[in-house]
Amino acid sequence: MIKLYTFPLSTNSRKVRIALLEKGLEFERINVDLSKREQKQPEYLKIHPFGQVPALDDEGFIVYDSTIINEYLEDEYPYPPLMPKDSEGRARARMMEDFRDTHFNPPCVKIIYEMRKPEGERVADVIATAKADINKCFDRIEGALQGKEYLAGSFSLADIAFMANFDLLDRFQIAVDPKYANTIAWIARLKARPSFAASAS
């Protein structure tokens, strides 16, 4: 059976949990408690040399980095498909997933770190800047959704990547401007998928 080394609050871990659920794959969740720095223990470093989550063990073959894990799952378990069939669509999906990884997720992580601190130690400017950076991303997302229900046309790994962050938008009260009608409708569609609720823990 597939083993997923995960942490419930990790957005990148959730990204892989969603993909596994969408594929209908059975997997064992092995919790790595980041708050106790279990990811830096020697035993776990044998699994993931950089001491991060997630990592996936598929019958002894270990893969790490959430984007690479999801690409591996698509290659190894191609049905149902989570990438477009055509090369242009696949490239679009990969570009949007990279945009999530490099521009959308980092400010979300910054907010998480600040909010974990005691209230008096939180830096308001860091939180405000992170929220502004997230809001800037909605311009790109809105454009990518023009005339489409999903980022690459059909539901794909690109959409799954962003789904992992939606709870944070609600938790930290980051509202999507009503002018981004495509984005608002897209978020609602993705939240309605069974994998969204099932991947929450």
Image: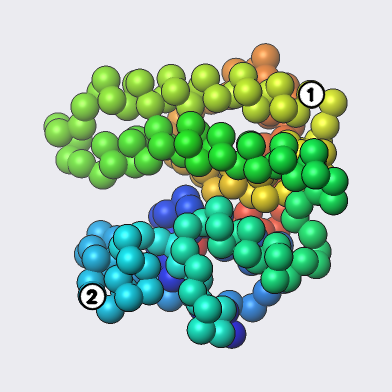
Question: Considering only order in the chain, which callout, 1 or 2, is on the residue closer to the N terminus?
Answer: 2
Foreground pick, 83 / 4: 83
Residue 52 in the image, given as x and y percentages of width and height:
35, 60
Which residue matches tag 2? 42
Q: Which amino acid does label 1 sit on?
A: Gln
* Tag shown at residue 166: none
Specify few, some or many for label 1: CA neighbours under 10 Å numbering under 14, 14-19, or 20 or more: some
Residue 45 in view in this figure? yes
Q: Image check: 13 left or right of 46?
A: right
Residue 89 in the image, given as x and y percentages of width and height:
79, 41
Residue 67 in the image, given as x and y percentages of width and height:
55, 53
| Viewer-side label of 2, 1 | 2
Instruction: Quadrant for residue 50, please give it.
Output: bottom left
Say which element carries label 1: loop
Instruction: Quadrant for residue 179, please give it.
Output: top right
Residue plotted at (32% across, 75% down): 46
Which residue matches tag 1? 146
Q: Image check: 116 left or right of 18?
A: left
Residue 107 in the image, given as x and y percentages of width and height:
40, 33
Foreground pick, 169 / 47: 47
Specify few, some or many for label 2: CA neighbours under 10 Å numbering under 14, 14-19, or 20 or more: few
Quadrant including the N terminus:
bottom right
Residue plotted at (20% across, 41% down): 117
Residue 169 in view in this figure? no
Instruction: Quadrant for residue 9, please give it.
Output: bottom left
Foreground pick, 156 / 24: 156
Q: Relative to 111, is 126 above or below? A: above
Residue plotted at (56% across, 85% down): 59
Q: Distance between the residues labelled 2 and 1?
A: 47 Å
